[in-house]
Image (spheres, grey):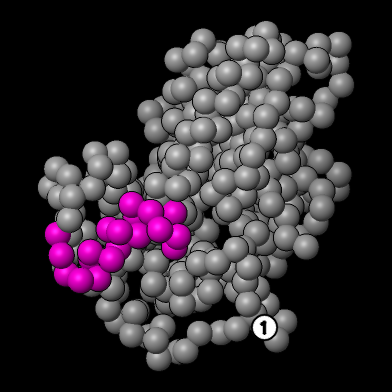
Amino acid sequence: MRRLFALVVLALLLAGCAREQVWHRESYVFGTRVEVAVWGDDEASAGAAMGAVLREFDRMHRAYHAWQPSELTDLNAAIARGETTHVRPELAAMLTDAKALAARGDELFNPALGKLIALWGFHTDTFVPRLPDPKAVQALVVSAPSMADLHIDGTRVWSDNRDVQLDLGGYAKGYALDRAAAILRAKGVRNALINIGGNVMALGSKGGQPWQIGIQHPRAPTPIAALALYDGEAIGTSGDYQRYFEVDGKRYCHLIDPRTGSPAMGTEAVTVLVTPRHGAGVLSDVASKPIFIAAHHWREMARRYDVADVLRVDADGAITVTRDMAARMKPLGDTHYTVLDD
């Protein structure tokens, strides 16, 4: 059975005399379960703030859905017709940001790959164990749709390549984290934890102590390690165990390598911790994708995105962590891992 979360939120499970002061709401959007927890405020104000966050998540889900009718599918239809179209300023800004982030990683983070994602059967909530037509895959590899093909002038958007089909699944959850943090702060909430299917952002603390989360093992029901998360920090995980299917004993996940047109191999999971900065939520969502796809060259990709805290599980199950991540995490159980020097 698929696990919905790459990260197990431990904070809400910890016993303590003030546990009743953690107010909690959850919903199901972006194809996953989302949770918002607020510490220390009265129930009414916390509930109002969390309700505003969940309404924003629902708005974004409907506006930027990759295959159900949305502003994004309207844009994709215009691109397929070779037309220039106007989009709302928010979407134009998101695409501009996503284009710049894609360029930093040689387009391994590539939201223009919607046609390939659909071809592999991941534009649905249930996955059929069936391989796509190799010729159709190869045609898209040759066409090489990328964010570099997308042009944005104000709110006008068009593409040189009609095979560009935008899918913001690797960007929108991080954007939603940043939006949630802004909404909570605007409503006076200073201590909260937001979890969108394993993409997590912390605000403030839990009773003066850092929020605690667990990094999920990609092949086991237990966490690899516990991790303290401080104000403004965000965690993102990409793994082959959330959206995948198997054919003849081989696993095919939704993380497509644009160089081959096929699901990335060589990595089971990557978790990145992004320290406080503007757009920390977005970066935590985006950076884990090219690091995952880069496989053995993941360290260079992490440096490109200025991410120092990384945990990677390779295709053989071996766990490697950067020195910065090792200093932050507490291994659980009989976890064995290698710490890199640089």
Quadrant in the picture for residue 326: top right
The x, y position of residue 313, in whole percent, is 65, 57
State the residue in front, 87 or 273.
87
**Residue ID at (21%, 59%):** 150
Disc 1 element: strand
Magenta highlight range: 65-84
Q: Is residue 9 left or right of residue 184?
A: right
Quadrant in the picture for residue 16: top right
The x, y position of residue 128, in whole percent, is 63, 77
| Mark 1 crowd level (few <14, some 14–19, many ≥20, 10 Å Cα) | few
Residue 264 is one of the magenta-drawn residues: no
Residue 70 is one of the magenta-drawn residues: yes
Q: Which residue is mark 1?
A: 247
**Residue ID at (56%, 19%):** 49
- Quadrant of the frame with the N terminus: bottom right
Q: Is residue 201 left or right of residue 313?
A: left
State the residue in front, 84 or 93.
84
**Residue ID at (62%, 49%):** 32
**Residue ID at (34%, 55%):** 72
The x, y position of residue 329, in whole percent, is 69, 35
Q: Is residue 286 left or right of residue 190?
A: left
Answer yes or no: is residue 314 visible. Answer: no
Above/below status of 59 relative to 293: above
